[in-house]
């Protein structure tokens, strides 16, 4: 199964999102990555708001590329209307291509803070439970701060990839119920 994965940041495309996708049922899939903001992609010209149009544009592009499924993930970044726009794109009848679209609340980085056991295992020191990940104003900075305290030598992108490999999916779903849980359900459905 060929899957086009479209996301915003380098941390998502640096292994973390792929590791999560493999653990959600895509362990035999072949992934191709691209950026949401790729200048080669033009937004769909029908009705709808900006992120809806961009997501549908990617859906049509994925069809043209001949992939079997599309995974599309953006950050909410405090703009709650993105959730509805991506939900509408997920449900759009414009294409029959299998898809899993989602919005990380507030940011993808919050998902890396959900499981203190995974954080402890990756960073090599005892880390307590982080407060509600989806309500942390700057989860990227929180992750950077935790990494700075570690004696482990890795980039933040590597940290995310390792956490995604170890995170308890049930814990992540429970602690990020607005962003990760619905996205995970869509991914599992897309992989059948």
Image (tube, rainbow, N blue to C red):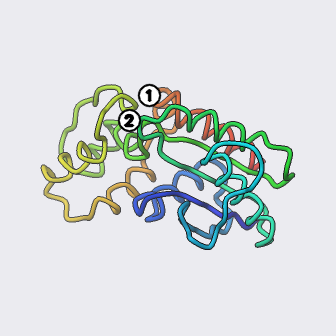
Q: Where's residue 82, x and y in %?
A: 56, 38
Q: Determine the residue positioned at 26% across, 46% down.
A: 143
Instruction: Kindly report the distance in space between the C-alpha atoms of the residues bearing marks 2 and 1.
Output: 6 Å
Q: Is mark 2 on a helix, strand or loop?
A: loop
Which disc is residue 128 wearing?
none
What count of labels does the image hold? 2
Q: Where's residue 145, x and y in %?
A: 17, 47
Q: Determine the residue positioned at 38% across, 56% down.
A: 162
Left/right of residue 174 with respect to residue 129 in the rendered view: right
Q: Which of 42 and 121 is in front in this view?
A: 42
Vertical order, 114 against 192 (above or below): above
The residue to which callout 1 is attached is 175
Left/right of residue 24 with respect to residue 90 in the rendered view: left
Q: Which of marks 2 and 1 is nearer the N terminus?
A: 2
Q: In which quarter of the image is residue 156?
A: bottom left
Q: Determine the residue positioned at 78% across, 47% down.
A: 192
Q: Determine the residue positioned at 58% across, 35% down.
A: 83
Q: What element carries label 1?
A: helix
Q: Which of 160 and 141 is in front in this view?
A: 141
Vertical order, 113 against 25 (above or below): above
The residue to which callout 2 is attached is 114
Q: Where's residue 60, x and y in %?
A: 77, 61
Left/right of residue 176 with respect to residue 40 in the rendered view: left
For disc 2, the neighbor class at 10 Å (few under 14, some 14 to 19, many from 20) is: many
Q: Nearer the viewer, residue 29 or 166?
A: 29
Q: Where's residue 154, x and y in %?
A: 25, 64
Q: Nearer the viewer, residue 2 or 140?
A: 140
Badges 2 and 1: C-beta atoms under 8 Å apart? yes
């Amino acid at each position: 199964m060929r899957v086009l994965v479209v996301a915003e940041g380098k941390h998502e495309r640096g292994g973390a999102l792929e590791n999560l996708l493999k653990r959600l049922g895509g362990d035999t899939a072949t992934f191709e990555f691209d950026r949401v903001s790729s200048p080669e992609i033009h937004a769909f010209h029908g009705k709808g708001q900006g992120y809806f149009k961009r997501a549908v544009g990617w859906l049509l592009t994925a069809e043209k590329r001949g992939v079997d499924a599309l995974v599309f993930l953006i950050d909410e970044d405090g703009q709650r209307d993105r959730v509805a726009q991506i939900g509408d794109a997920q449900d759009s009848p414009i294409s029959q291509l299998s898809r899993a679209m989602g919005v990380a609340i507030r940011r993808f980085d919050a998902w890396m803070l959900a499981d203190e056991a995974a954080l402890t295992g990756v960073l090599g020191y005892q880390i307590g439970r982080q407060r509600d990940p989806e309500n942390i104003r700057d989860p990227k900075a929180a992750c950077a701060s935790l990494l700075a305290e570690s004696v482990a030598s890795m980039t933040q992108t590597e940290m995310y990839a390792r956490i995604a490999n170890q995170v308890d999916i049930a814990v992540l779903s429970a602690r990020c119920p607005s962003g990760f849980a619905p996205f995970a359900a869509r991914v599992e459905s897309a992989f059948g």
